[in-house]
Image: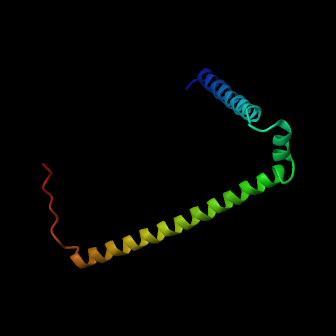
Amino acid sequence: MGRAERQVNKAARRKRRGGFIIGALAGAVAGLMLAPKSGKETRAQVFGEGGLGSQVDRVKSAMGAGKDSAADQSEALKRKIEETRERLRRQMAGSGEDAPVDETPPE
């Protein structure tokens, strides 16, 4: 890839990123403007009692719960893999490793 191509790719990435940011901002503004509450009520919800700080706390606690859930699922998956591995080892040991192998090609 030449220098000119890299510059074109870099410019395209910047343009996409800028478009994404503008789209996100436009969506946020449209959401606030089209909300079924008055501006005063919306501001009170976002910045008022509890407001932004409580929203951040709520998001953090949800992320923490998600991490805990993912860790639990990861541990369960590891246990299941280890159980399966042990079961397969027992089966291999029980069947004898000197058993003949069918080397006929599939039809």
x, y percent for residue 86: 37, 75
Most foreground residue, 24 or 49: 49
Residue 29: x and y in percent read 76, 32
Residue 95 image-quadrant placement: bottom left
Is residue 49 toward the left or the right of residue 76 in the image?
Answer: right
Q: Residue at x 62, y 20 (%)?
A: 4
The answer to whether residue 70 is above or below residue 34 is below
Q: Is residue 8 above or below residue 57?
A: above
Q: Position of residue 105 (x, y in %)?
A: 14, 52
- Corner quadrant of residue 16: top right
Q: Quadrant of residue 20?
A: top right
Q: Position of residue 93 (x, y in %)?
A: 27, 77
* Image quadrant where one finds the N terminus: top right
Q: Nearer the viewer, residue 107 or 74?
A: 74
- Look at the picture and state if 16 lies above or below 106: above
For the rendered model, the colour scheme is rainbow
Between 94 and 33, which is closer to the camera in this rendering? 33
Residue 37 lies left or right of residue 81; in this view the side is right
Q: Residue at x 43, y 70 (%)?
A: 80
Q: Is residue 74 above or below residue 92?
A: above
Frontmost residue, 19 versus 99: 19
Residue at 86% across / 39% down in the picture?
A: 40
Side (left or right) of 27 relative to 85: right
